[in-house]
């Protein structure tokens, strides 16, 4: 299976691209951090990311989703973020890199879980706040830099997906992977 990652700064448009790809027939795997935040906030924790245990909860959900996303050989599947993003998040938040996160980073490297070329969705020039995304535009650029450095550190190549219309951004991804869409077309 070819597991491609979409990453980038919060609010860059990763999830919108993922939805477009899903509607075109590609299997997709959701981001874990947003769901961990939503669950913990529903349990009365207003800022779950402030607790260092947050990182391990994200790692555990990412692994569960990655392992549950099996498919036939050669199938293209897209993932919204990875443990490398979780590493970048820990660095950004000033949390230590836990044993669980270090083990997961070692595992994905040793097993070659993800393709080495990562789609880096670049910032559109603004950030729209949400309950899970409470970051300023300036801080999002710092977070973007940390993400780029993290992916480089772990041996990945970031392929930029420039700001622009959603269809153009998603088409750039499809062209790169050359995968089929729900209409039977192939990128390329």
Image: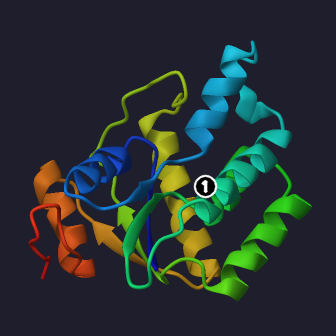
Identify which residue is drawn at 64% across, 30% down.
Answer: 37
Question: Is residue 91 among what the camera can see?
Answer: yes
Indicate whether 60 appears above or below 47. below
Circle 1 crowding by C-alpha within 10 Å: few under 14, some 14–19, many from 20: some
In the picture, which quadrant includes the C terminus? bottom left
Q: Position of residue 185 (x, y in %)?
A: 9, 72
The residue under label 1 is: 65
Question: Is residue 94 among what the camera can see?
Answer: no
Foreground: 51 or 17? 17
Foreground: 153 or 185? 185
Residue 20 placement, left or right of 93 = left
Q: Position of residue 98 (x, y in %)?
A: 87, 58
Q: Position of residue 130 (x, y in %)?
A: 46, 24
Identify which residue is drawn at 52% across, 57% down.
Answer: 81
Residue 59 placement, left or right of 159 = right
Identify which residue is drawn at 43% across, 25% down.
Answer: 129
Q: Residue furthest right?
A: 99
Indicate whether 76 appears above or below 145. below
Residue 32 placement, left or right of 126 = right
Foreground: 55 or 143? 55
Q: Position of residue 34 (x, y in %)?
A: 56, 37
Foreground: 5 or 12? 5
Q: Quadrant of residue 83?
A: bottom right
């Amino acid at each position: 299976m070819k597991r491609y990652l979409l990453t980038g700064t919060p609010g860059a448009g990763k999830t919108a691209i993922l939805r477009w790809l899903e509607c075109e027939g590609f299997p997709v795997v959701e981001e874990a951090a947003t769901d961990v935040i939503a669950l913990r906030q529903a349990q009365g924790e207003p800022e779950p990311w402030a607790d260092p245990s947050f990182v391990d909860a994200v790692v555990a959900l990412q692994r569960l989703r990655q392992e549950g996303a099996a498919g036939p050989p050669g199938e293209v599947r897209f993932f919204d973020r990875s443990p490398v993003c979780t590493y970048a998040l820990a660095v950004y938040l000033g949390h230590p890199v836990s044993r669980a996160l270090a083990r997961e980073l070692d595992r994905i490297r040793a097993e070659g879980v993800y393709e080495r070329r990562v789609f880096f969705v670049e910032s559109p020039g603004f950030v729209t706040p949400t309950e899970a995304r409470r970051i300023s535009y300036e801080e999002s650029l710092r977070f973007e830099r940390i993400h780029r450095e993290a992916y480089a550190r772990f041996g990945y190549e970031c392929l930029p997906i420039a700001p622009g219309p959603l269809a153009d951004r998603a088409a750039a991804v499809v062209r790169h992977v050359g995968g089929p869409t729900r209409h039977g077309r192939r990128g390329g």
